[in-house]
Amino acid sequence: MAEQRTERADAARNRRAVLRATEQLLAEGGGDHVSLDRVATLAGVGKGTVFRRFGNRAGLLQALLEERSRELREAVTDGPPPLGPGAPARERLLAFLDGLGAIAEGNAVLLSAHEQACAEDKYGDPSYRFWHGHLSALLAAGRPDLDADFLAHALLSVFDGDLIRHLTPPGDPRCFTRSVQRMATALLGPG
Amino acid sequence: MAEQRTERADAARNRRAVLRATEQLLAEGGGDHVSLDRVATLAGVGKGTVFRRFGNRAGLLQALLEERSRELREAVTDGPPPLGPGAPARERLLAFLDGLGAIAEGNAVLLSAHEQACAEDKYGDPSYRFWHGHLSALLAAGRPDLDADFLAHALLSVFDGDLIRHLTPPGDPRCFTRSVQRMATALLGPG
DNA sequence: CGCTATCCGGACTGTCGGTCCGGATGCCCC
DNA sequence: GGGGCATCCGGACCGACAGTCCGGATAGCG
């Protein structure tokens, strides 16, 4: 539904330019630094172009996030174990948290900006629903006695850009992920 | 430091009027409905007055949240068990989560608005630090082998206004709190 | 009752997200 | 190669908002 039959060449070029400009602005200043005016100017396009492609601020950030996490989503559905199907639920869960943690740690600023932009419908966002569904299924497989749906929300709620930056010391970029994995292990119990 | 020697009567009256106006606007529309212009108008004061009292949007919402949670904080530090000191850590933890959950469930809209306004320093906010310190101490007392500091952040991260509204069905207002308590129990293990 | 520190009000500014439409341009078909 | 049309572009424009500022009002004290 979002894809036209064919996208005109200039449209594709502009889309790429806008995404590149967005990530550049995110890198050089905080999330607040990314105003759509600035994105458009840096990308060398008009403001209207940004909105036509991405709908609004949230859509723009979501597209960037989607680009950064598509690989993990494919690995989770179609890839080899332990991420993909085939491994025991416990191993798949830890592998998944590792992958998601890596993305989150590497994109904490983008995460914060996206959380702030997605004011109200964060839990209806397709991307969120996918992560939640996957997590929920793995949890239910590991511990059928627990409330997998809620625990999946709880585990995801910890992937907060600000929290990640607050908990990541310089020199140990995977600290957050390890903490999440330890928590998940404690939740699953000594199974 | 925030208290003047004596607050003029009109200043105190205006402060109350602003807080009342804020909660009224929060109640009748979403968090976005609370613009400081509207608050000032509804309170019957000028815009400058709102800013002089509360600094900015975040300060206003924080003041309201503080008002709603002061009782719990006092009960936790000075009150009788199981909330206050004296009960076993496990019981205190569950009682604390019950109290915090009640506040969060009753103020989900305010919570959302506050989260959005406190863009960057959410984890430095004195109120957050208090809850985190308390939770962290109780967790450390119950399970010294776990990373209490991280788990306290994780438990608090689930108190998200949007998530609470998303998980609270009509007719079961305490559903969220029970889920949180079950999660905490699972974390503490079968001790 | 008068004086001063304090407070009030609302006009003002700069910025932002989002809309709109006249003009340009890529693309397909002849 | 060229013409016609659907698509896209750009940036002027709008309304709303957070936050600032200062001339004027007033509470409270002596």
Image (tube, coloured by chain):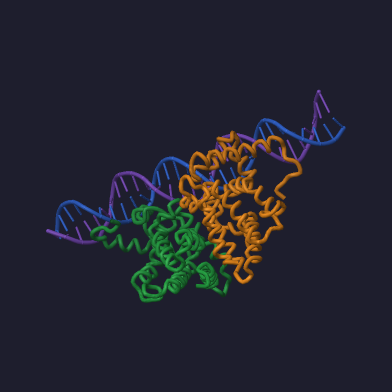
Chain colours: A orange, B green, C blue, D purple
- Give whichever of A84, A17 is nearer the camera: A84
- Quarter holding the N terminus of chain B? bottom left
The residue positioned 46% from the left and 45% from the top of the image is A170
The residue positioned 58% from the left and 65% from the top of the image is A188
Look at the picture and state if A90 lies above or below A28: below
Relative image position of residue D26 (x, y in whole percent): 26, 58
Look at the picture and state if B119 lies above or below B67: above
- Give whichever of D29, A6 is nearer the camera: A6
Can residue A144 be seen? yes
Relative image position of residue B138 (x, y in whole percent): 42, 67
Can residue B29 be seen? no
Question: B153 left or right of A130?
Answer: left
Look at the picture and state if A172 lies above or below A86: above
- Give whichever of C18, A145 is nearer the camera: A145
- Give whichever of A91, A129 is nearer the camera: A91
Look at the picture and state if A99 lies above or below B95: above
The residue positioned 45% from the left and 64% from the top of the image is B144
Relative image position of residue B65 (x, y in whole percent): 41, 63
Count every numbered label the image shows and give the total: 0
Relative image position of residue A109 (x, y in whole percent): 52, 47
Figure quadrant of residue A9: top right
Question: A2 left or right of B164?
Answer: right
